[in-house]
Amino acid sequence: MQTGQFQPSKSVIRVSPFEGYTSYAPYTCTQCAEGWCMTACPVGAIQINVAGAKDVIDDTCVGCKLCTIACPYGTMFYDGDTQKAYKCNLCGGAPACASACPTQAITFEEAETADWIGDFAAERTARVLTLEPR
């Protein structure tokens, strides 16, 4: 979320501790093909922008938080100040985090990604739809 000021609590890159805080892993929106957040939004406030990222349209978002619940990666966030959802939007194709990182630990590369949840969701949906009513 680009706020124009230093606010780590509103960062779209979070760091998760592992193994009793002996190692850490950063995570942010993977821009998954399924777009669970986009599908869950009842008002269509999440659209795909020119960079290919799912982008929250502030004027349309009603702050219901359904997208934050739907995201299996935990990378949709809610801002209590604006009462809107927010996530990484790739800064229009030139992520500021990648250009600002002094050690180049954060890089932006367009790559083909495997989406294991997509296969699982398709299989699960097919099974549920074929169940006969009792």
Image (cartoon, grey):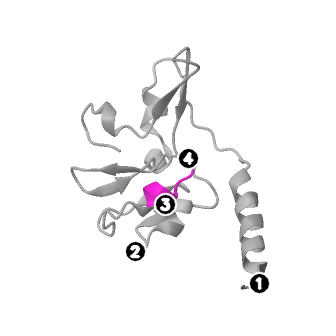
Q: Distance of mark 4 from mark 1, alpha carbons?
A: 32 Å
Q: Amino acid at mark 4?
A: Tyr
Residue 58, how many percent across, how many down?
A: 31, 62
* Pointer 3 residue: 49
Task: From the image, state whether disc 3 or disc 2 is nearer to you.
Answer: 2
Q: Which residue is mark 4?
A: 73
Q: Quadrant of the C terminus?
A: bottom right
Q: Which residues are magenta?
A: 67-72
Mark 2 touching mark 4, by CB under 8 A?
A: no
Front position in the image: 62 or 20? 20
Main structural element of the magenta stretch: helix, strand or loop?
helix
Specify whether 89 is left or right of 4.
Answer: right
Disc 2 or disc 4, which is closer to the eye? 4
Image quadrant where residue 19 sits: top right
Q: Position of residue 15 (x, y in %)?
A: 48, 29
Amino acid type at image mark 3: Asn
Image coords of residue 123 (percent x, y): 77, 65
Question: Mark 4 against mark 3, which lies toward the viewer?
Answer: 4
Question: Residue at label 2?
Answer: 43
Identified by mark 2, the residue type is: Val
* Residue name at image x 23 percent, y 54 percent: 82
Q: Residues within 10 Å of mark 4 (few under 14, many from 20)?
A: some
Sequence-earlier tag: 1 or 3: 3
- Whichever of callouts 2 and 1 sits on the residue coming sooner in the sequence is 2
Asked if residue 114 shows in the view, the reply is yes
Q: Residue at x 42, y 27 (%)?
A: 100
